[in-house]
Amino acid sequence: MNVMLFGPELYYLGTALVFFLLTLRRQPQVKADYQIALALGLGGLVVTTLCLCQQGELFFKAYRVDLFSQIFKFALALGFFLVLTISHNLAHIEERYHAEFFLFLTTTTIGMMMLVSSVELLTIYVSLELSSYSLYILVPLRRGDGIDVESGIKYLLIGAVSSGVMLFGLSYLFGAAHTTYLSEILPQMPQLVASPIGLLGLLLALAGFFFKLSVFPFHFWAPDVYQSATNQVTAFIATASKAAAVALLLRLAALGAGYGYSFAQALVFLSIVSMTLGNLVAIVQKDFKRLLAYSSIAHAGYFLMGILTMKEAGYVAAVYYALAYLVMNFTVFMVISEVAKDGRDLKIQELAGLYRRSPLLSLSLIVGLFALAGVPPSIGFTGKLLLFTSAMSQGYFWLVLIGAVNGTISLYYYLRVIYASYFTDDPSLGPVTISTPIRVLNYALIAIVLGFGVFPDRIVELAKAAVKTVL
Amino acid sequence: MTEHAATFPVLSCMLLAPLTGLVILLLLKENQKFLIRAVSLVSGGVSLALSIYTFVAYDKALGGLQFVEKFEMVKTFGITYFVGVEGLNAPMLLLTGIVIFTGVLTMWELEVRTKEFFIWILALVTGVFGVFMSYDMFMFFLFYEIAVVPMYILILIWGSTRKEYAAMKLTLYLMAGSGLIIPGILLLYASSGLGTFNMLALHGAHFSPWVQKVAFVLLFFGFGVLAAVWPFHTWSPVGHVAAPTAVSMLHAGVLMKLGSFAILRVAMFLCPEGFQYWAQLMSLLATVGIVYGVFVGLAQTDLKYVIGYSSVSHMGIVCLGLSTGTIDGINGSVFQMFAHGIMTALFFSSVGYIYDRTHTRDIHELGGFSKIMPVASAFFITAALCGAGVPGMASFWAELLVFIATVKVYPVQGLLAIAALVVGALFALRVVQSTFFNAPNPKFTHFEDVSPFLGLPRMILIATLVFFGFFPQAMVGMIKTAVVPFLQGM
């Protein structure tokens, strides 16, 4: 076995062991731990980059390493590293738990990395649970009032229900196809999708990922969890975790490609409800993270738009948008965690006068939000338009029309945030100081969001090469 | 359409000039005010020089698309950076160049958050230039959005009179328009089956009548919002009133033209049958807009509202010309876009100057303003005369062409519009009379008149109006090189 094939996973397993050892310290050494974490995160980025072009199969063909999986592993490593960069003050987590925070962040990353490579039903399930359970612990890790526990339990319960539903769906697929390998289920799909058992099985099997992506009707956890988890954990859930969910949805939905009219129609329905619901409810939110939670529900609808086309163009657009979403959403979360240095939940009105308190952060905020709203020249605009293009090419005129109208609605609440940060002022709020690394990070994120928005060809070609192995 | 590649990337330079200025501004400090203004002026000046160059150097005998530059942006989706100049967009590029240059000069005295202001203005202008020169639908739309969005911030920070309401209304209206445009262009892209956004290539794809009808109506209303087509005009007077001077100039002068230009360039060009089907409706809405704008304008007492409603009416003339689908009509329309752009810029520029000093735009409060500031008043009066369609000014010829075409094609609408214009002339004279020739308001007697330097931008605008008023052939001949093949292609 070529070690490089399993390289990223092994590396992060090693990282997890290091963090485990760190948790055993009697006296927590926060500063040192953070520096170790940062170095390891950077190392992970290097390892995943080196393993980008690996190809092969492992573990009795239950595990496939190809460009598709490796791109998403890189994205996960990037998300992991980015979240670490804003974890320099975990104000709401007790000091003795800081090492545990890093440990569980690593294990959830490992779970997601295994997820994007799994091509066998049971492996998919086990990896999904590994990543989910770590998150179940991370969410209530925040010190504070009852709401954290409440949302932790909510997250656990909805997660458990959705994975139960998913298992049920998987059992249908297994019962009908007599195999758990995706590659062997695929040829049998034409007959299966036509029958209720296959269609139902596939839809239920997707439930676990609908939960991760917060697609309607598995979205109820998102607002509470976003609000009550620490900013860093929320950032991770909102970025890396979404990318992994998109990857798996692409893999599984490919099973229904080209056969099931009703399968695509079901996804169209979910997409429309998700984006409309998310956007409309976001309008009335006062807490910034809650607003972003509803925006993530709306974005889940956009992702489905690319997935339900079941064609190369749609898959390319979805992969592009998943990567774009990771960067632009993180940009916004970075601003949140820098402005709310004490780890509190940020109300929108607490952004008042940000242009004066920190011009750079307010610029990042504007770039990030405009990208989420799909305003050019940003990766968000290009990605969204590519998604719309691919959906329209498959004849989903009404879906695109509704999506475009939704874009307008979403701009309203993003503008409200920009309004608060640029046009209201509160003299009692002092300036926000940011360290030099964060300053560099700001510039880098802005450059990525704008640069790849205008010149997306590199990423699109990469995504195109990647999805070839999935479809 | 024949394409002639550029020997030197003039258009890219025109696009990069404001962008470069923007990047330099980012590096400057807020208190280096003179440098900030100078950099903005130079980058605006470079664009202006290049736009004059393309206008003059365009080979009318050769025709077709000149100064073409092309490179593939996204192969998989068929997105190309494809820019060029022809008779239709050369006047628009020139207009943009003139308005940005004079706009920067007009805002010379701005002291509040100067750096940010010019950054956003230059971003907006980059978008405008991009729209006018792009022949790829994707890039066209990308630039279109870039041009529209900075308005929100520009109005909110530097605006006046109900600016929060106006900014949000304007942005949501325009974005709702985009919500129609996206399905429109994607429908054309998808049903062509060519997998390209190149508009010249798409022109060759024979869309089914049904697709054309649906796409045209989506694009017409989508872009029509920006062109202030009645009944989607209500954002425009409010927005113009709230916006700071240079932004009003750019917005009424150039941005609204993006809408009508896009209707011509994308909707009519790609969906000729759809256009035939909806042309009647277009002409009706345009006529209602003309009449409505004039009469609502009559009742206003705020100078900027007066101009705002007169814009609605003048943009109606542009749409009316387009709806005829004849050589004269389109010729007049494009000419009117240019003339109205310069004229409105002059209007807002002179009102801005008066408002900055007196802090009022109330017609009755200003009273006999020409006795206090004869030169500043003269600028406004010239613009008003131009708006009334006095011969010797550019818009006279433009309106004449449109009306000749309209009376032939839609006699009823044509006569109604002409009648409204007569009332409009009356109303311009009334405004001029009560603003400038009554008894002067003693509150304002201590103000000094415009200095030559601050008057410069208005002089440039007046010179342009008069030049094309006396030599309309310079413009009409240019536009004609494109309109004839355009209509043959339909």
Image (tube, grey):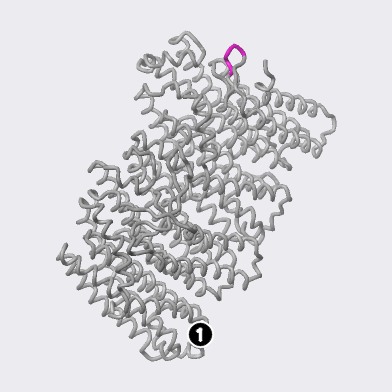
Name the image quarter holding residue A197. Answer: top left
- Callout 1: chain: B
Please give left or right for residue A335 compared with residue A412 in the image: right
Name the image quarter holding residue B236. Answer: bottom left
Residue drawn 61% across the image and 23% down it: A114
Q: Residues within 10 Å of mark 1 (few under 14, many from 20)?
A: few
Question: What SS does tag 1 mark?
Answer: helix
Q: Provide residue A377's location: percent of width, then percent of height.
A: 51, 50
Please give left or right for residue B213 compared with residue B132 in the image: left
Q: Provide residue B194's location: percent of width, then percent of height.
A: 35, 39
- Note whether B176 is above or below B415 in the view shown: above
Q: Residue furthest top?
A: A178
In this view, the residue in front, A138 or A471, is A471
Name the image quarter holding residue B62. Answer: bottom left
Residue drawn 65% across the image and 70% down it: B32
In this view, the residue in front, A228 or B108, is B108
State whether residue B166 appears in this view.
yes
The main secondary structure of the magenta stretch is loop
Q: Provide residue A333's location: percent of width, then percent of height.
A: 61, 44
Residue drawn 66% across the image and 50% down it: A339
Residue A198 on the magenta segment: no
The disc labelled 1 sits on which kind of residue?
A: Pro
Q: Residue furthest right?
A: A27
- Number of numbered discs visible in the structure rendering: 1
- Note whether B130 is above or below A455 in the view shown: below
Q: Provide residue A153's location: percent of width, then percent of height.
A: 60, 28
State whether residue A146 appears in this view.
no
- Note whether B196 is above or below A165 in the view shown: below
Question: Which stretch appears magenta?
Answer: A59-63
User: Which residue matches tag 1?
Assistant: B452
